[in-house]
Image (spheres, rainbow, N blue to C red):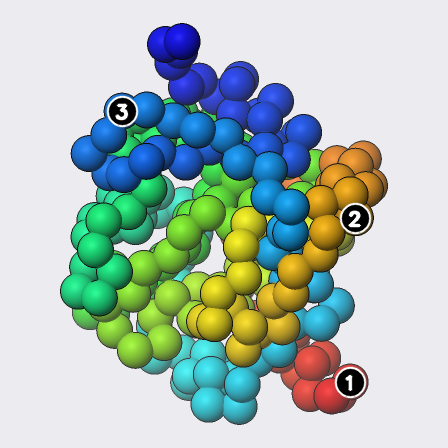
């Protein structure tokens, strides 16, 4: 059955715990995923390694939000050394750009000397943020973007950060797997939260968030 991905369809899917993937970047077919085990980063258990804390505090990157969403998703879609093809096809790029224009999808970008060198993007609905993908051309660029994302979510009262799956890269930040039924319960609770994703969020607030982690660790 042929159908067109739309912002409305994506919002319904995410609200029901389902997300789309393409077979590959060059394929047009889309399949829907509701994993038996779902990856999350508990917002009250986010871990920032010491070296990364120093990188954030030194402000070696200028971190922006929503200044280059389309460029971020296209960077995430591009094949890279050691990664090969991706699951982000042109239909996904187009439909998430539509979500962004409607205010439901956001990017966090790391910049150096006027060049975007890393970033991530995801979908925000209620108090849930669904992380989609990230890329990095410079050491720590995407990691710093992730710290800025979590600081925003915690500071704005979000209840959930969905990572879809758990990778070795994400485990260093406290990512873990939970069973599907537990995920859906957490999602229902997060969706009742009227949190608003903060596009404006200065570096001092990120520093304060890191300080709060130091005090409780």
Which element is circle 2 on? helix
Q: Name the residue under label 3.
A: 28
- Mark 2 and 3 residues: CB-CB less than 8 Å, in contact? no
Q: Where is residue 217 in the image (x, y as percent from the top left)?
A: 74, 88
The nearer-to-camera label among 1 and 3 is 3
Q: Can residue 159 be seen in this view?
A: yes
The nearer-to-camera label among 1 and 2 is 2
Q: Which quadrant would the N terminus be assigned to in this image? A: top left
Mark linked to residue 182: 2
Q: Looking at the image, which residue is at 63% across and 51% down?
A: 38
Q: Residues within 10 Å of mark 1 (few under 14, many from 20)?
A: few
Q: Mark 1 points at which residue?
A: 216
Is 50 left or right of 88, judged from the image as shown? right
Give the distance between the C-alpha atoms of the residues marked 1 and 2, in whole angstroms. Answer: 26 Å
Q: Where is residue 134 in the image (x, y as percent from the top left)?
A: 38, 57
Counting residues from the start of the chain, the first of labels 1 and 2 encountered is 2
Counting residues from the start of the chain, the first of labels 2 and 3 encountered is 3
Q: Looking at the image, which residue is at 60% across and 56% down?
A: 39
């Amino acid at each position: 059955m042929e159908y067109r991905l739309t912002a409305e369809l994506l919002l319904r899917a995410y609200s029901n715990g389902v997300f789309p993937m393409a077979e590959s970047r060059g394929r047009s077919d889309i399949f829907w995923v509701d994993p038996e085990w779902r990856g999350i980063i508990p917002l009250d258990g986010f871990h920032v390694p010491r070296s990364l804390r120093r990188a954030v505090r030194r402000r070696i990157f200028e971190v922006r939000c929503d200044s280059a969403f389309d460029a971020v998703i296209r960077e995430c879609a591009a094949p890279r050394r050691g990664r090969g093809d991706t699951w982000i096809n042109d239909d996904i790029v187009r439909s998430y750009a539509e979500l962004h224009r409607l205010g439901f999808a956001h990017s966090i970008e790391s910049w150096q000397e006027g060049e975007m060198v890393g970033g991530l993007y995801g979908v925000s609905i209620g108090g849930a943020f669904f992380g989609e993908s990230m890329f990095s051309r410079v050491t720590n660029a995407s990691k710093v973007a992730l710290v800025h994302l979590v600081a925003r979510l915690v500071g704005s009262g979000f209840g959930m950060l969905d990572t879809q799956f758990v990778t070795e890269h994400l485990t260093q930040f406290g990512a873990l797997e939970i069973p599907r039924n537990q995920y859906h319960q957490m999602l229902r609770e997060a969706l009742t939260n009227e949190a608003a994703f903060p596009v404006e969020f200065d570096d001092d607030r990120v520093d304060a968030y890191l300080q709060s982690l130091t005090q409780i660790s």
